Image: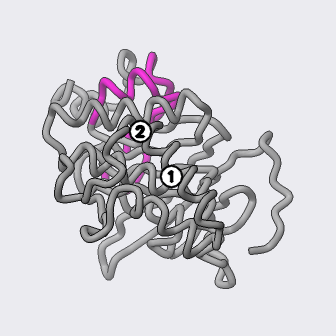
Amino acid sequence: MAESTWTPKEPMVSAKDVHKSFGDLEVLKGISMDIMKGECICIIGPSGSGKSTFIRCINALNPIDSGSILVEGQEVNDAHLDKLELRKKVGMVFQQYNLFPHKTALENIMMAPLKVLKQGKEEVEARARDLIKKVRLDGKENSYPGELSGGQQQRVAIARSLAMHPDVMLFDEVTAALDPETVKEVLVTIKDLAEEGMTCILVTHEMGFAREVANHIYFTDRGIIVEHGPPKTFFTKAKDPRTKEFLSQIL
């Protein structure tokens, strides 16, 4: 990955006129947004509006067709991009936890730093134990995923992503598959991260969380950003009829 001359005065993530199609279906129709270091951004909108596709483009899981996405000054759309280097900087947590069922919570968290970062086992284990505490799972170090609730597994997945020391965390509908009582424990974990200054980009349906934690909210519909703003004005003074209709259905 080319050395970046990025400084925190510039956006940590900058998307400009991003287009993405799957076959004949244009999913992103010119998405632009800037996210500064330490900001928490929530992207909301109806299913199929391009939210998840967009954040998957940020860490190069989906290649974009045109436009630009810079992460710390590095063009994600560069043919010579080192995706592994990018994904060290950009952690991602998905709706499905994707934990290794035959490895304990602690082992799941330790795998990538050992194999990818080639860090020493003692250092990695100490950090993994700290991360278990951070996501409020003390005592679950030796539990296997099948012995954990969905919310606990999702928190292990968050800790696993944090073990790579990312600069940006992407969360793609991370509470969508959870029981209502376990949603809160995952959201509290993300809120802690945001309050500590981690740059967070969330695709979410959790409006209470977005209102409380986000610096800025983007509403997408059919591949475009319809409206955006800070929570105070977004939830009370939405201008576009599509935003108003969406909010009336979910609030």
Residue 27 is drawn in which quadrant? bottom left
Tell me: 177 left or right of 142: left
Image x and y of residue 233, in percent? 45, 18
**Who's the residue at 18% across and 46% down the image?**
149
Percent across and percent down for residue 67 are 59, 67
Magenta-span inclusion, residue 212:
yes
Q: Residues within 10 Å of mark 2 (few under 14, many from 20)?
A: many
Mark on residue 135? 2
> Disc 2 to disc 1, how far (Cα)?
11 Å
Of residues 35 and 222, which is closer to you in this image? 35
In the rendered image, residue 112, in percent from the top left (x then y), is placed at: 51, 68
Q: Is residue 42 left or right of residue 127?
A: left
Residue at 32% in and 54% down? 142
Secondary structure found at label 2 = loop
The residue lying toward the viewer, choosing from 182 and 119, is: 119
Nearer to me, 233 or 173: 173
Bounds of the magenta segment: 206-233
> Residue 56's quadrant in the figure?
bottom left
Visible residue check, residue 32: no
Left or right: residue 218 versus residue 181 is: right
Task: Mark yes or no: residue 18 visible.
Answer: yes
Q: Amino acid at mark 2?
A: Val
Q: State left or right for residue 102 relative to residue 18.
A: left
Q: Which residue is mark 1?
A: 128
- SS assignment at label 1: helix
Q: Residue at x 18, y 44 (%)?
A: 178
Residue 221 magenta-highlighted: yes
Above or below residue 229? Residue 135 is below
Q: Earlier in the sequence, mark 2 or mark 1?
A: 1
> Could you tell me residue 189's position as x and y percent?
41, 35
